[in-house]
Image (spheres, coloured by chain):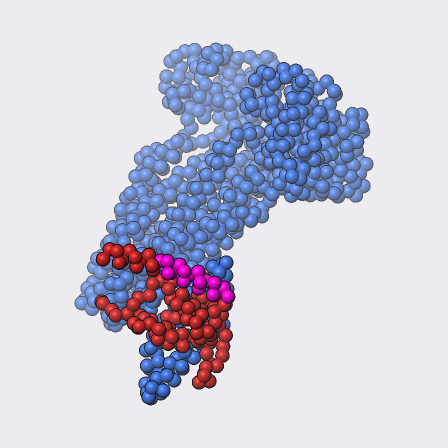
Amino acid sequence: MSRLRRFASRIFLSLRTSRAESELSREISAHLQLLEDQFVAKGMSREDARYAAKRAFGGVEQAKELQRDERSFRWLAGWPMDLKLGMRMLVKTPGLTIVAVIALAVAIGGGAAHVEFVKDLFHPDLPIPGGDRVVGIQIWKPVAREAESRALADFATWRGRITTVEHFGAAAWLEAHLITGDGRTERARGRRMTASGFHLVATPPLIGRTLVEDDERPGAAPVAVIGQDLWQARFQSDPNIVGRTVHIGSVAHTIVGVMPAGFAFPSDTNLWTPLTMPAANLKRGEGPVIRMFGRLKEGTSSDQVEAELNALLAAADPTGSAQASAATAVSADIRPYVDSLFMTDPDNAAQRMVLYAANLLFLLLLALCGANVATLVFARTATRESEITVRTALGASRGRISAQLFAEALVLSVIAAAVGLAIAKRASGWVTQLIEQAEGEPRPFWWNDSLSAETILYALGLAVFAALIVGVTPALKATGKQLQGRLREAGAGGSTMTFGRLWTGIIIVQTAVTVICLALAASLGWTAYRGLHDYDVTFPREQILTAGLVLPESADKPRAYREIARRLKSEPGVVNVSYASQPPGAGFEQFELEFAEPAAAASAVLEDDVLWTRSARVGPNYFETVGIPLVAGRLFTESEIQDSRPVAVVDETFVRLILGGRNAVGLMVREPSEETDKPGPWHEIVGVVKDVTIMPRKKTDDAMLYRPGAIDTQPSVDLLVRTAGSAAPMSQRLTVAALSVDPDMRLMDAQSMDRLAEQDALAVRFFLKVFAVVAAVALLLSTAGIYALISFTLSRRTREIGIRVALGAEPRRIIRTVFSRAFIQIGIGVLAGALPAAVIVGRGVEDAGGIGTAAGAGVALGLCAFVLLVAMVSCIPPVRRALRIQPTDALRTT
Amino acid sequence: MPSENIELLQGTLDLIVLRALSTMGPLHAYSLAERLAQVSDHPLSLNQGTLYPALVRLEHKGHIKGAWGKTESNREAKFYQITKVGDAELKRQTEKWQRLSGLVNKLLTKNT
């Protein structure tokens, strides 16, 4: 009790010092007065008595210090001053501040952004009442290790009986186009959902009503609720929207309400229709794919829900026949909502650990940056040596001085953390935007750009970690054993602290790491840049419209396609129509080659001992539509495509790299399928066409082999429409024309091919930016480190330089002798980095079909020269300072 | 360096101060120091200033409390007085000390 009381008093008095201080002064002067009176009474003069009193009392300041130590926590009391000093140091050495903040901010920001990303991915704060209790429910098949997502039958059984979950509901994809009265069509992000989804989120509708249980009755009039974005974009914010009729696929629906922006449950939905309950004889494994959700009742655990549902599962299977067989045994699996959307495997802890462990990379980066900044701080500390020495002489303990240097470092790292968090916020915004643009879909409703409290706390933790590295290491070094010796030499002028082995090592490692970092950035950057140019093609991309086409299984696919092609061709501006298994020049299937004539591919250079080519299965008029000219032989006939006959057309790269320029027409190829031991059919090469992609240094696996692909043999194809002018403005009109054939078919992501290429390039550009930032930070740190090393060397040898100048030494000689050690360290670092850099550039770039080992070594040498040049440049200011040293000034400092 | 002064064991100063306040009633730091010098045959290695940490420690623990007053010579001074908590603590610490010192005594005499 008394201990606690004392602890509280000390804390209190650490923060409120002024009253305690004046009380102490008053008490001690009263004490001295009494002592003085006593000595006067003994017959001393007032003057003598005063001195005698002070002697008897002992050191007044020491007594005060001791009392302060007992009264408060000194380190706590000293903090405001230390922090103030820290702020002042930042302003005093702006160069160091900027470099340190940038370096630490990138590392802290990266770590924070990663934590935020993982949190948003796995356990975001759902903007739903009781969001932490919202769960996803699925039926798990332990043997097959997969979820049974066709579980509408089970859902129908459970929904009337379940007691541990409220607003128990389910949602299924709504795979159809939204077609409005004016004939416009759009692939809305639709879901068929139970009304309980609306009750769960409890967001009131903007207009009209949400879906209700009555809508789910079999035979109820079809209704739909739309999202605000759809309402604004497609219905011009029509206030009389309720009651309007739209077609979803071929079925007419009445719009009954509009949900406000921000409501997109279950993930990114903007069109909802009721999930109607199935006929009674539906079995597990039949019906649509659904996801079940609900909120745990207050005070209920997911284990209880699992137990209840497992009991219901057992009750539905009274004979136990399903559970008896391991293959058909199922159990209920309950997990936090978002978790359940992303990963279906209940045992995903390991995957999560891997994602979280990736944060170690950022810790490592922070440690590296911190060590670098520590070098700089140590160099600065060396210039404050006399301050530290004097403070030690006045009684400041090692801990006290370390605490001050730590506080200074903390100010630095907290500012860096703030900058880092700002970067993290921007970066997560960019990444989200990037994903949205690349996917063409909005983020899920729980994904926000704001940083969570956990992320901010984590960043602050990183700041303390950085401050420990940055502040404490130099502090311990600066206040170490040699301090006493320095006290004696303090008057001798110049710094006596030494850049020990540790720091020398750091400089060398850092220079080497910089060279390697630049090599990595160059290699990855070049690879990514080349990736961009993979999309350089020989055909007019902007004149080709692509869209994913899925025809309903029930339809007569060849007939439906012929009709689509006929209607599209009759549209003005359309030149030709075709389809393929993927758009030209982008994406491909692999085709492993085996020749009937073994000598055919003798000259081919093999990748991994296997002869691969790219392959696509194409529809009628494909080559004419894309605009690929025939070079030799012939193209596919209509009947060859209809029957998917074993014939092939290859491109010029195939002829050049695989056949060594020989005639391809008439050769037979097939896939030697290893898995089944049953090779594919022999394909006869009937023609050779021009390449569609332009790439320097193509390899054999860039060659292309086209095969005929009948529409009914493929679940989905890419519809290709060649237009006379720009394709982009026609996409809506052509979608409508195609859909008029069968409103139940799906036409996805209709856009011109140049837009597609742009989307693909987005990610590449982003990574190029990231590489650029990492390389810039490495270079900045290295430059700053070298500058610190030279400055430090200079501050140590000011006096020596002064004497040399006085003795008439040549400036060049001074520079050489004084800085030779620093240059040797940098040289060693550059050499150490050169070999790995050469390997990285040579290998890395070569893998991407690039420049080869010799050129790689050349690039590495160039990088080394660049780093040396940067080192030289960063030496200029200290060297100039050194040459300006006046002998008189240098010697006067004694 | 050999010294005639007795180094106080850590923590014993608090006990001595409590004892003095318990016997003498309220005292200020000066008279407390005088009292300690008076009762010890050997001069303690105690500058008068070293009392202050002990006083603030005891005050924080609630064992003593201080109040400003006037001395006989009409000088102002802060008088310290033992509290009830302090009394109890003194009793406990005294017993503990006596047990410990008795034991140490016994051990030392037996070994010599």
Q: Is residue B87 magenta?
A: yes
For the residue pair A819 and A469, the one nearer the viewer reads as: A469
Q: Write down the quadrant of residue A640 in the picture.
A: top right
At 40% from the left and 74% from the top, the residue drawn is B32
Quadrant location, the C terminus of chain A: bottom left
Q: Main secondary structure of the magenta part?
A: helix
Q: How many numbered circles does the render carry?
A: 0
Q: Is residue A59 visible?
A: no
At 46% from the left and 42% from the top, the residue drawn is A359
Could you tell whether A247 is left or right of A265 in the image? right
For the residue pair B86 and A263, the one nearer the viewer reads as: B86
Chain painted blue: A
Q: Residue furthest left?
A: A807
Q: Write down the quadrant of residue A861 in the picture.
A: top left
- Determine whether A529 is above or below A640 in the image: below
Could you tell whether A376 is left or right of A149 in the image? left
For the residue pair A247 and A52, the one nearer the viewer reads as: A52
Q: Give the drawing colour for chain B.
A: red
At 50% from the left and 68% from the top, the residue drawn is B83
Q: Position of residue A809 (x, y in %)?
A: 19, 64
Q: Position of residue A572 (x, y in %)?
A: 69, 30
Q: Is residue A235 magenta?
A: no
Q: Position of residue A669 (x, y in %)?
A: 46, 14
Q: Position of residue A471 (x, y in %)?
A: 38, 56
Question: Range of the magenta residues?
Answer: B84-100
- Determine whether A474 is above or below A670 in the image: below
